[in-house]
Each structure stands twice: as C-alpha cells, then as structure tokens.
Image (cartoon, helix red, strand yellow):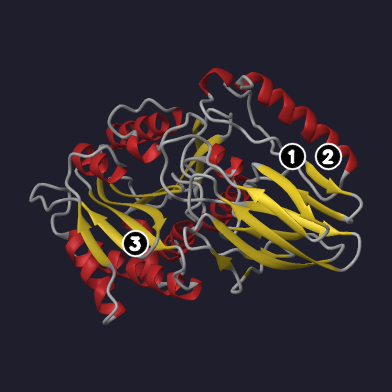
C-alpha cells in the first residue's frame, strides 16, 4: 500500500501535468500546507482517463470528484469502481466525474460498488448550475451495480450523485453574503488539508442573544446545505420581521465544516478519517475544535446566550433529530413550537421527529448540554424536491423569528 505522503505527491504531480495539458480539468487549491501526518484516508489518484481509440475521456481531477478505478469493457461501455475513503462508514456512496468525447457518441457506464450499495440517482449538468436527474438507471438486485447511458459530445458533461457544491463555491457564497448583509467573516481555524473554517456573524444586535447555524459536516449532504442557504438568507432578508430579528439577535453561521471531505469527494469523513459529527465530546479533530473554541469564546466575551442552534444534514428522507425536553435551556419549549410550525405548514406529510437524547457525541447534544441552547439536527431528504426544500426552509425561518421576537 502506498504511504499517504507518496499518494499525496502522486496527486500533486498528476494534477500539475493535467492542468498544463488539459483545459477541461482543474486542481484543488490548498490555502495552507497540508498536515500529512493527520491524513488517515486513502486519497484518490486525480487524473484524466484517456481512451484515445474510442475518443472518450473521463476525469476525476476536480473538487468533489470520486472515481476510484475506471476501465473499458468495450468501445462504448466503461466500468467505474466507487469505494469510500476508509471504513467503517455510513452508506453514502458518493460518485462524481466528468466525461466528454471527440465526436457525438453514446456511452454506457456501470457504477460498481465492490462492498457497498448504490444510493443516489445520477444527476448531470453541462454548466454546473442546471442539474437533471437521470431517470433511466438500471440497478441490480443487490444494488452493487448501477448502469446508465450518456450522450456525449465535445462539451464536458459532469455526472454526480447530487448537485456539486465545492468548498470554493461555498466560500464564494459566504463572501457575497457578508457583503450583502454586512456580516463579519472570521477564519476560526483550518482543516487538516489547510482549508479555512469560516464563521459569519451579523453585527446589528448587542450580541447578547445568539442563534447558531451549522452545515456540511458530511460531504454528500447537499440537500441539507441547500436548506441551510435558504434558511440563512430568510433570516437575513429584507422583510420587516427579518430586520427586527437581526437587530435583536446575533446570527452565527458556519456553513462549511468539512471542506477537505467535500473536495475529496468523501462519503462521510474528514481527512482524519472520522465522522466529524461524532467528535463533539472528545474534539480530536481541528475542525470541531475550532468551532467549539470559537463559540465558547464568543459566549464568554459577549456574556451571551445561545437561544437556538440548528445543524443541517441530509439522509434518505426528511427527519428532525431533537434533544430531550429540558426546562432549563435558554428558551424552553422553543424546539416544540418550531417543529409545530413546520408540521402545520407540511399538512399530512409531516417530517418525522426522533428524539435522541442529550448525552450523545453529536453537535446538537453539545450545543444543548454545554451552551443550554434549544438545538436540533435537520435532516433533509436526498430526493426532497428542491423547490419544496426552499419553501420549508423559508417557513421554519419565519417561525423561528416570530417566536423569538415575542416578548
């Protein structure tokens, strides 16, 4: 087995060569030196897979790509092996690749999972903005193989398990958000790979009452990230209620907790090979430590209370994981009121609620136990319609503001 250092050097060398030779690929940029000793996962070999005779080209040389192996079956059929960064791991079998051809051509792709199962319907895009779900996908009985047809041309086609939102795209959104709404932007720490962990906070209140929003602890959880964006933009919006809310409450947003995992195309883990949302007791990872230290320092320095905290995730279908009710939080009963507002909006198809206790090693448990916040995890379904995600996120943001603004 190659050492992590050797793998890293191979990736950098291949990336530089491909960047010079092929315009259709881009390399992942590091903002600081990577801590190689802390990398506990198997990194991918980033490259362009060239099939010159067939005139077909694949690439995993871009942020969020995942292709572990690729081979030709015949002149129009290709096998792509998909494996996780390490094990044991949650079954979130992420894949992403780019493909193009010299001439218009149909190709057939088989996604192979040697030890895992297919989860996500492939989505395709030519511009990175408009994504279309491939409906005609054949999955075998064991779910270890998924096959589909692609229509290729000289224009690059991106195929992925979900819409791709890389760390750089998230950082760009943060910059625009900070500019539009006069937010402070603070680099509170760095990931193992040297990428910034960024916190944004609003500045128009006295900082005594705080709401905390977290996202992207798990790389593939795009639908949760989408809900977070809409939720935050509603809280910061131009409605009279939003303006009043920001004058009375400081909003703290940490949108990209696991940038390394996101850009490596990981299924679940960080470069440390761990689930960051199971590190909220020991805080062994730099990403979670940075958030803990930042929030504790802020609360102490401002003599503040965190009234509500929401961590956005994704899973197979919409679920709310709540803490057990406590009479001594900074706003007792707020979670129940917030959930009722969501359920009233949803009608008959209500999001499931699963209390999971206050003593766990996940973010909501720490936020409740240590900061006395009303805290919960909002899991958005993988296939929840994107317009409905926005509608629900808007509604629950309005419910939160209305309740917190009551005397």
Q: CA distance from mark 1 to mark 2?
A: 7 Å
Neighbor class of circle 1 (other Cα within 10 Å; few <14, some 14-19, many 20+) is some
The disc at residue 245 is 3
Q: Which residue is denoted by mark 2 in the rendering?
A: 19
Residue for point 60% across, 63% down: 122
Relative image position of residue 400 (x, y in whole percent): 29, 64
Tags 1 and 2 touching, CB below 8 Å:
yes
Label 1 element class: loop
Q: Is residue 361 above or below residue 283?
A: below
Question: Is the N terminus in the top left, top right, bottom left or bottom right quadrant?
Answer: top right
Question: Toward the viewer: 297 or 34?
Answer: 34
The disc at residue 27 is 1
Of the numbered discs 3 and 1, the one sitting upstream in the chain is 1
The disc at residue 14 is none
Question: Toward the viewer: 292 or 4?
Answer: 4
Q: Given the current orientation, which residue lies at the most extreme left position?
A: 327
Residue for point 66% across, 69% down: 130
* Apparent side of residue 91 relative to residue 128 in the rendered image (left or right): left
Q: Is residue 353 above or below residue 358?
A: below
């Amino acid at each position: 087995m190659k050492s992590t250092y050797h793998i890293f050097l191979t990736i950098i060398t291949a990336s530089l060569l491909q960047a010079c030779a092929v315009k259709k690929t881009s390399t992942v940029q590091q903002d600081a030196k990577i801590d190689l000793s802390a990398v506990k996962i198997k990194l991918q070999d980033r490259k362009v897979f060239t099939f010159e005779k067939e005139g077909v080209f694949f690439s995993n040389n871009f942020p969020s790509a995942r292709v572990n192996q690729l081979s030709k079956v015949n002149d129009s059929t290709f096998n792509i092996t998909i494996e996780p960064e390490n094990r044991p791991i949650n079954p979130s079998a992420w894949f992403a690749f780019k493909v193009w051809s010299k001439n218009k051509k149909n190709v057939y792709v088989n996604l192979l999972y040697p030890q895992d199962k297919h989860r996500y319907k492939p989505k395709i895009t030519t511009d990175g903005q408009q994504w279309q779900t491939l409906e005609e996908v054949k999955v075998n009985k064991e779910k270890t193989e998924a096959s589909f047809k692609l229509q290729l041309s000289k224009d690059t086609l991106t195929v992925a398990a979900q819409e791709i939102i890389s760390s750089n795209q998230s950082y760009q959104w943060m910059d625009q958000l900070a500019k539009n709404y006069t937010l402070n932007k603070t680099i509170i720490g760095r990931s193992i790979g040297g990428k910034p962990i960024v916190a944004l906070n609003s500045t128009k209140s006295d900082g005594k009452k705080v709401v905390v929003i977290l996202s992207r602890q798990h790389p593939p959880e795009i639908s949760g990230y989408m809900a977070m964006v809409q939720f935050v933009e509603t809280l910061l919006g131009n409605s009279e209620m939003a303006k009043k809310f920001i004058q009375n409450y400081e909003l703290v947003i940490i949108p990209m907790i696991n940038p390394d995992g996101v850009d490596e195309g990981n299924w679940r883990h960080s470069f440390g090979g761990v689930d960051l949302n199971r590190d909220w007791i020991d805080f062994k990872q730099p990403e979670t430590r940075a958030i803990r230290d930042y929030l504790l320092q802020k609360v102490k320095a401002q003599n503040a209370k965190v009234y509500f905290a929401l961590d956005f995730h994704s899973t197979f279908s919409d679920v709310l994981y709540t803490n057990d009710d406590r009479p001594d939080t900074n706003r007792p009963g707020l979670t129940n009121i917030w959930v009722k507002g969501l359920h009233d909006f949803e009608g008959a198809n209500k999001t499931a609620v699963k209390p999971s206790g206050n003593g766990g090693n996940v973010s909501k448990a720490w936020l409740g136990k240590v900061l006395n916040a009303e805290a919960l995890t909002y899991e958005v379904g993988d296939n929840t319609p994107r317009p409905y995600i926005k509608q629900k996120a808007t509604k629950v943001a309005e419910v939160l503001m209305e309740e917190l603004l009551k005397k």
